[in-house]
Amino acid sequence: MEINLIQCILIGGWTSICITGMLTGTYLTRCLVMAAGVGVILGDIRTGLLMGAAGEMAFLGFGVSSGGSVPPNPVGPGIIGTIIAIVMKEKGVDTGAALAYSFPFAVLIQFLITGIYTAATGAVSQAEHAVEKGQYRRFRLLANSTLILFLAAGFGIGFFAAFHVEGMERLIAGIPEWLTKGLGTAGKMLPAVGFAVILNIMVSRDAVPFLITGYVLTAYLKLPVMAVALIAAAITWLLLEAEEKARIKGSNKQETLKTQEKIPDKDRKEASVLSEKELRRISRKTALRAYFLQNGYNYGNYEGLSYANLMFPALRKVCPNEETFRQELKESMGYCSVNPNFLPILTSIHLVTLNRGIAGKESRDIRVALMGPLAGIGDSLVQFCFAPVFSTIGAVMARQGMIEGPIVFLLGMNGLLLGLKLFSENLGYNLGMSLAGRLRERLDSLSGAARSIGTAVIAGLAVSCVDIKMALTFERGGENILDMQGFLDLLFPGALSAAYTGLLFYLIRVKGWTMYKLVGLTLGVGILFQAAGVLE
């Protein structure tokens, strides 16, 4: 199959759009979404969906770094892997092999992303200088520098991958058949790496019962992932209800805080720059701007430059004095690292206190103290609960050739995340600074519940999506007397998949292996054991 110039440009544009999902949190940078788009452009939607499903499972846990390592980038399998799978389909390259071939590209792309974050660090000092001179257009351009670089890099990756596909095809054609089959076997095992990585973040002693529950429900009862998630959610709901009843009995005095926080309308008007109605409107609009939190992400102040940019319109309203506005804008450019979906808690606290005459510098310590817990809680909810459930549902639909799979994933994820942002804004606005301790306590419980549900789901996925089958059989007199895979399925269904995921989990949790080592081990095991006739 040949790819024409128009298709190269379209793939470049599609990659450019999707790669920005890493910054905006819209989940466009997922194998499921990217591969479906490439399939539409190249006229082979089915292969695109199958490749997206395979890549989604393999890269499920790669959204979170482990230790000092940086995960391979899903653009590798989502764009380049899908191009390989479609162009070389007639030459015997299946989605498993294409997934394995795409890993080197995934690593290289992540190196490029790291380079962009490093280069964007220089924008911080330039942005500060622009604010001092009142050059606000330049400031806002610099605050979006990472996004601009991502757009350019994405187009280059997609265009040149499609334009030079013949070169990749010749390279892959020179690979011997035994290696291709081995890579195909390894590709089916690679989802175990993603599951091990995500379990390393999620699993604690309290979550072990959910780990076992997820395995049993999937391996023995053959329940789909949605059923596993619902059962786990029901269990955690009961546990949270019991915990809440115990908390209420032991802390009735805390109810008085609600009345202590109320301020007479007369006093509020005297102390505030804006009316409560106007401030609430601005706070909600700022909450929606949380999508821009990482547009200027860099290794200098992380999300600090973008935080100042998204607060820019609100600060204009709350700080009518030009000198005060510049000072607050510069103060807002400090270190910031928080999950975007819980950012509105910080922005609403910032705006409420600022509107009452408390400088942002004075409330900054409280906001910084909340960043760490909110970042962890956001990852628990989004990366370890929402994303695995919706991506798995989408991947299962994609495996069945349903284009609705990626659509369901995008609508489900973005609908939930929008609601979470608005919910966070409401919490931050109503509770305020004095309720920060109580807020953290409530979200910790929610985080634990999310981890429990996610653990059960991942345990089930390890059984259903990691495809490891033994090829060993024992014969006597030309008659097959023992099929090892059949024997294992009878006693412990999915035992090899669960055991291999457990091995990788042990290596990353106890031995401190990086994801690159885990990928290397999986590729090696798949190639060697398939060549030796141990695995199919």
Image (spheres, rainbow, N blue to C red):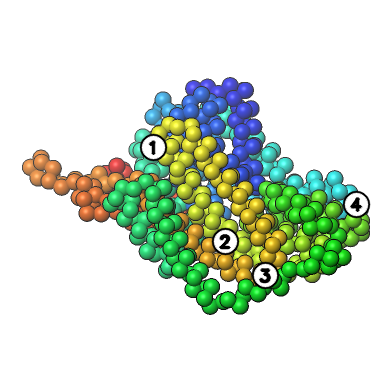
Q: Secondary structure at mark 4?
A: loop
Q: Amino acid at mark 4?
A: Gly
Q: Give me the residue at 23% from left, 51% from top.
A: 488
Binning the other alpha carbons within 10 Å of mark 2 as few (below 14), some (14 to 19) or many (20 upward) gives many
Q: Nearer the viewer, mark 4 or mark 1?
A: 4
Separation (CA) of disc 1 from disc 3: 65 Å
Q: Nearer the viewer, mark 2 or mark 4?
A: 2
Name the residue carrying label 3: 258
Name the residue carrying label 1: 180
Binning the other alpha carbons within 10 Å of mark 1 as few (below 14), some (14 to 19) or many (20 upward) gives many
Name the residue carrying label 4: 134
Q: Give me the residue at 62% from left, 75% from top.
A: 254
Looking at marks 2 and 3 on the same chain, the residue that comes earlier in the sequence is marked by 3
Q: Amino acid at mark 2?
A: Ile
User: Horizontal placement of 205 versus 332: left or right?
Assistant: left
Q: Nearer the viewer, mark 1 or mark 3?
A: 3
Residue 263 lies, with reference to residue 176, above or below; the image says below
Separation (CA) of disc 2 from disc 3: 24 Å
Binning the other alpha carbons within 10 Å of mark 4 as few (below 14), some (14 to 19) or many (20 upward) gives some
Separation (CA) of disc 3 from disc 4: 42 Å
In-front residue for pair 244/36: 244
Name the residue carrying label 2: 377
